[in-house]
Each structure stands twice: as C-alpha cells, then as structure tokens.
Image: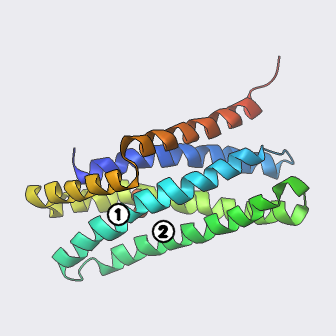
Amino acid sequence: MKTTEVLVKEHVLIRQVLDSLSIAREKLEKGDRPPKEVFEKAVLFSKNFADKFHHYKEEYLLFGLLAQKKEGALDLEIGALRYQHERCRHFVAEIKNAVDGYSSGNEIIITTLLENLAPYISLLRRHIYMEDYVFFKMAGKELSDDEDRALLGQFENEDKRIGGKDFYEKYKKIALEINSMMQEMTTPSV
Ligand SMILES: [Fe+2]
Ligand SMILES: [Fe+2]
C-alpha cells in the first residue's frame, strides 16, 4: 500500500463521522435533541483520530517531506491544507466547549453547536476532497518508490507509537457507535 492510499483509507472513516454529524446537525436545526454522547464521541474521534493521528501524519511526515523535496514550490498548497487543519481544530474546540453544557438545553449552547458544526463538516469534507482528488494525486507522482517506502515506515512507527491496530479498531468502533445512534434517531418507530 502507498502512503497516500493509507491516508485515503483513513478519510473513509472520517467521512463516516462527518455524515453522522451532518444528520445530528439537521436534527438540531429542526428542534430535535440528538444524544449528548453523539457529540462527545464525535469530539473524541475528531481530536484523536482525525487530528492527532491522521493530520499529524500528513503535516509532519508527508507535507514535511514534500516541502523539502520541492523547495518551496508547494508552499501555497501545503499552507492552505495546514490552515484548514488549524481551523478544524478551532471548530472542534468550540464544539467541545458547547457539549459540556449541552444537557442544560440552553439555546445559546445549541446556537454555538450549530455555528461550529456547520463549518467543521463543510470545511473538512472539502479538505478531504482536495486531498483525495488533487493533492495526493500530485504527491503520488512526486514521490519516488524509495521515498514512499521510507515514508510508509515512518507512518508505521507513528501507528505503533499511538497504539497500533487497537487504536484504529477503537476509533472504527466509535465511528460505528455514532452512526448507529443517529440511525436510531432517523428510523421511524413501528
Ligand atoms: Fe489533511
Ligand atoms: Fe487528510
């Protein structure tokens, strides 16, 4: 497997959580109250899997290597992707703060949730689209087989450092749990 294929595979899981969050956001708009756990688990997933695990590998390993290799020629593209990671972190921090007071039913808390969920979902979906269809395609052509193998080795070390297969399975399970909680809300009771 190539490094960009590893990242694309992780995007699939991240997109699943974004799809569930999107349903939760629609429910909130219509006055429904998705369980607090949906948002708590989504924050946990976004902070640990999407950011600390996935964005770390992109920013510090892949982008770092490409920036060095292309000597500044990709600064604009990499800068934009880094900026989007940073904005995602900001929205997740705001969502986390709002979730802490969610049970109170306070309208200001719901407002804060809505005004951060919408840009988070939209921005990360576009970010993933740009990576999958533009940036990673270019990266795949730029990296030699040896460079890709070395980078893959660094990815594997990072995976081990963070918890290996167990880490991936844990967050896959969390993504599924979020999905089934939202499915329960959307399935009409008989
Ligand atoms: Fe990214
Ligand atoms: Fe990504």
Q: What kind of residue is marked 1?
A: Glu
Q: Disc 1, ligand 1: is the CB inside 8 Å? A: yes
Q: Quadrant where the C terminus lies?
A: top right
Task: Depth check: give the residue in front, 187 or 103.
Answer: 103
The coloring applied to the image is rainbow
Residue 58, label in figure: 1
Residue 177 sits above or below residue 134 on the image: above
Question: In the rendered image, is residue 126 in sight?
Answer: no
Q: Residue at x 36, y 49 (%)?
A: 8
Pointers 2 and 1 in contact (C-beta within 8 Å): yes
Amino acid at circle 2:
His
Please provide percent x and percent y for residue 65. 22, 70
72 or 129: nearer the eye? 72
Q: Which mark is residue 85?
A: 2
Mark 2 CB lies closer than 8 A to ligand 1: yes
Question: Is 113 situated above or below 87?
Answer: above
Residue at 51% from the left image edge and 47% from the top image edge: 15
Q: Is residue 41 above or below residue 142?
A: above
Tell me which numbered mark, 2 or 1, is placed earlier along the sequence: 1
Q: Is residue 95 left or right of residue 33?
A: left
Tell me where residue 26 appears, x and y as whole percent: 74, 48
Secondary structure, mark 2, is helix
- Quadrant of picture, ligand 1: bottom left
